[in-house]
Amino acid sequence: MKGLQFKRSFRVPLIFGVFSVLWIMFSDKLAFAMAPNLESAGLYSMVKGILYVVLATTLIFLLLRKDESNKDQLLSEIAAVQRSFNLLFEDNPQAMWIYDNNSLEIMAVNPAACKVYGYSADEFRKLKITDLRREEDVPSMLKVISDYKDELRQSGPWEHLKKDGESIFVKVLSHPLRSVGLDSTLVSVIDLTEHQKTLSELDTAMQERDDFESFGYTASHDLKAPIRAILGYSDLLSREYGKKLDDEGKGFIQQIHNAGMTMNEMLDDMLVLTGISRKPLEYERVNLSEIVLETMETIKLQDPERVMELNVKPNMFVIADKGVVRLIAQNLLQNAWKYTKKTEHAMIEVGNFENTEGETVYFVKDNGLGFDQSYAEHIFEPFARAHKNSTYEGMGIGLSIVRRAVEHHDGRVWVEAEPGKGACFYFTLQQKEMITNN
């Protein structure tokens, strides 16, 4: 029967038994048929016996030799697999473990994971993967796991807890394992702190980084110094010679002062814009809702009497750089505040939702002036403004800062707007990437 196999302990005796039966049946008949008398038949039987022993011994030797050869080959293959496993798992510098998909218990762990998380190998194997997450994050983690298919998948950033309770922020590469009846998953963890440090070191070698640093130096030293001189001399001229000037002359001095202040503000914005990409990200758990409320309290000081309806979805948590997230919120809210100042019953809404690709999308929506959607691609460029009216202050840098900050978090930003009906800015801070085996 095809596919029928016997263990070595059955295979060798079976072949030997079949050979012996066939030898006895046919060799005796052949000996008596060839012998002229009984004396010759006895001699033939003795020769037949000796020949049988020789052939049987040879057959057993060949069978055992073949089995030993197969065994050596199998042991060699097992050793090669073991070496590969040690290289890919045990000796891998990245933290790795294997967990049971049903019980979520950790079945195996490599030394790198023990070093990163602070557990011994025995302690690690007593854990479930849920023990490495905050209690409030477990439901979302279980949902992500339930959506996994038979494919290699990268996701994150996630917050993991070490043995001492300290948080680390990681990306996770996972792949299901289907072997010898086990339903498990292999996990490889990328520490974003070290990963970001590596990316930052690589970025310093890029020409764009050199250009930004060169521009920042020029702006802060070569340009800001003469601007301060212009502002200082215009103030001095106004104080010392203001009485000798007519209204037109005083107006000229005021225009000089205003132009200097505008240039100074523009340089400050440009320094922020060029500095975002050069600063390594420091990941932490950030409450975006709180940042929005704090930022709006500061913005309202510009016009305390102004009435504004603000709707903010509570407890929007994100794993990101807090300072950069604050920059995003500040510039988007300032933009909404600016372009709703002539709107009756002005309203700003901040919230989030999950799109069809599993991304968390955040938005800042207003019912202000709005603009033509055809200009949406250009509004994030430096010094680009949808409205040229000088009634609306600003240099056109704020939204460029937003785009640079979002892209620094591997996210994207876009806007939907309509003249007279406001605008809604959307952004993501991390994109979930799917990697499939070909």
Image (tube, grey):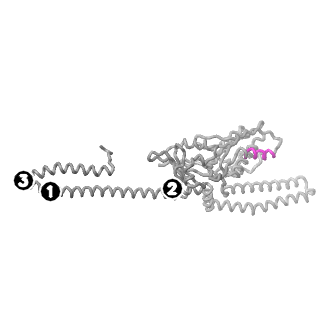
Q: Residue 327, image x and y in percent? A: 71, 50
Reading the chain from its start, which is encountered first: label 2 or label 3? 3
Task: Kindly check if marks 2 and 3 are in contact, taking CB atoms under 8 A apart as contact.
Answer: no
Q: Count neighbours of disc 3 (C-alpha within 10 A) and say few if under 14, some if 14 to 19, many if 20 or more.
A: few
Q: Count neighbours of disc 1 (C-alpha within 10 A) and say few if under 14, some if 14 to 19, many if 20 or more.
A: few
Callout 2 secondary element: helix
In the image, what residue occupies the spot 79% across and 60% down? 227
Which residue is under mark 1?
46
Q: Quadrant of the N terminus?
A: top left
Reading the chain from its start, which is encountered first: label 2 or label 1? 1
Q: Count neighbours of disc 2 (C-alpha within 10 A) and say few if under 14, some if 14 to 19, many if 20 or more.
A: many
Inspect this view and state whether residue 401 appears: no
Please give the range of residues in magenta.
Answer: 291-301
Q: Nearer the viewer, mark 2 or mark 3?
A: 3
Q: Is residue 330 above or below residue 194?
A: above
Which residue is under mark 2?
89
The residue type indicated by label 1 comes to: Met
